[in-house]
Image (cartoon, rainbow, N blue to C red):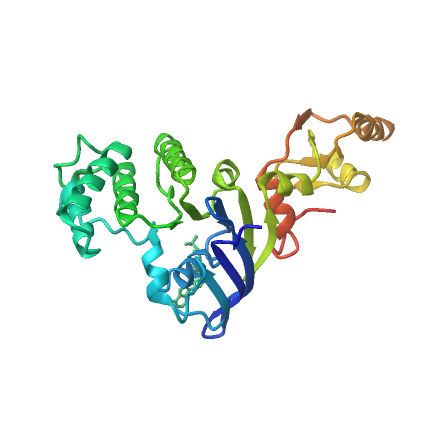
Amino acid sequence: MDEPVISVKNIRKSYGKQTVLDGLNFDVKHGSIFALLGENGAGKTTMVRILTTLIKADGGLATIGGYDIKHESQSVKKIISLTGQYAAVDELLTGEENLQMLGRLNHLDRDTVKKRTEKLLNQFDLQDAAKKRAQSYSGGMRRRLDIAISLLADPKVIFLDEPTTGLDPRSRKNMWNLIQQLAENGVTIFLTTQYLEEADQLADKIAVISGGKIIEEGTSEDLKRMVGQDKLELTFRDQTSFHQVKNILEGQMNENEWSLSVSTEGSTENLRQLLNKLHEYEIEPASINIRKPTLDDVFMELTSDLNEGASVND
Ligand SMILES: Nc1ncnc2c1ncn2[C@@H]1O[C@H](COP(=O)(O)OP(=O)(O)OP(=O)(O)O)[C@@H](O)[C@H]1O
């Protein structure tokens, strides 16, 4: 159907002997929110820097809005913007001046700059702070100004590199609302995050990056479905019972807390069988809980064979 706005095929990048991106493939649909989810150092920023033409890939192909990032980088630059770890905010200028400066840098006419500045200051709830220097802004305000600046040139695709890292929970929620509004207005959003909850809340599609590869891709529901249905969480009073259980039930173990998380596969019959088994072996759990799977479960499941020492028995 729709041509993807971003198309990435077999993108590779190494630094010296370290392979950071080992053949990445994914597509991003127009007007959607795409999240690249990965731990510290997984290569998320490297991918963003390649797509935003700041650095070159060693191999592979990528297009944005149909333009090749390697051979048509000027056209790519005109339709994208980048915010996040490289703040565009000039601390010594006011919020308004920051926006105006960017307008001039983009050769927009005076009238357009004035109108867009007003609109963005309103949209990002910065009217009251418009005439104050950015150095007096809180972290959340600065982040909002950063995004407002990046929207001034009316980009089709916006890259948000870890947009909420370091923000308090309330500012984070505000930022999520803003990101959702942007997508509703037709801007395509490419987001990187280490926060599973953030990807879960925002993204239409999530790609999990680990070991230089996309190890899974889908909606948050798809990913959750992979790790099964509800989880049965059991904790034990002593190590002996915990070790006994390890031999009879399969699941995600936590050695420190003597706890075990088992998929119920969505059936009460299965749940009953699991509990019967414990009864049969005369093992009494200290606590029993049933909970919905989270993206944390997905991440643990997917990266279990990559991370040494992980203890997921599947
Ligand atoms: N210019 C560079 N020279 C050498 N190594 C680099 C360079 N840039 C990144 N790396 C390495 O590449 C790996 C991936 O880094 P990258 O910043 O892309 O990860 P990330 O997923 O964005 O992590 P974070 O969440 O910490 O920002 C890291 O091991 C990093 O040290």
> On the picture, is 110 further left or further right than 144?
left
> On the picture, is 306 further left or further right than 92?
right
> Residue shown at 24%/32% (left/top)?
122
Coordinates of residue 242 in the picture (x, y in percent): 73, 36
Quarter-of-image position of residue 107? bottom left
Residue situated in front as seen by the camera: 171 or 3: 3
In the displayed structure, 40 sits above or below 115; it is below
Residue situated in front as seen by the camera: 247 or 112: 112
Residue situated in front as seen by the camera: 254 or 85: 85
Indicate the quadrant of ligand 1 in the picture: bottom left
Q: Residue furthest right?
A: 280
Count of residue discs: 0
> Residue shown at 30%/44% (left/top)?
147
Coordinates of residue 52 in the picture (x, y in percent): 38, 60
Coordinates of residue 82 in the picture (x, y in percent): 34, 53
> On the picture, is 302 further left or further right than 16?
right
> Residue shown at 71%/38% (left/top)?
228
Coordinates of residue 254 in the picture (x, y in percent): 64, 40
> Residue shown at 43%/47% (left/top)?
188
> On the picture, is 41 further left or further right than 217?
left
In the displayed structure, 47 sits above or below 235; it is below
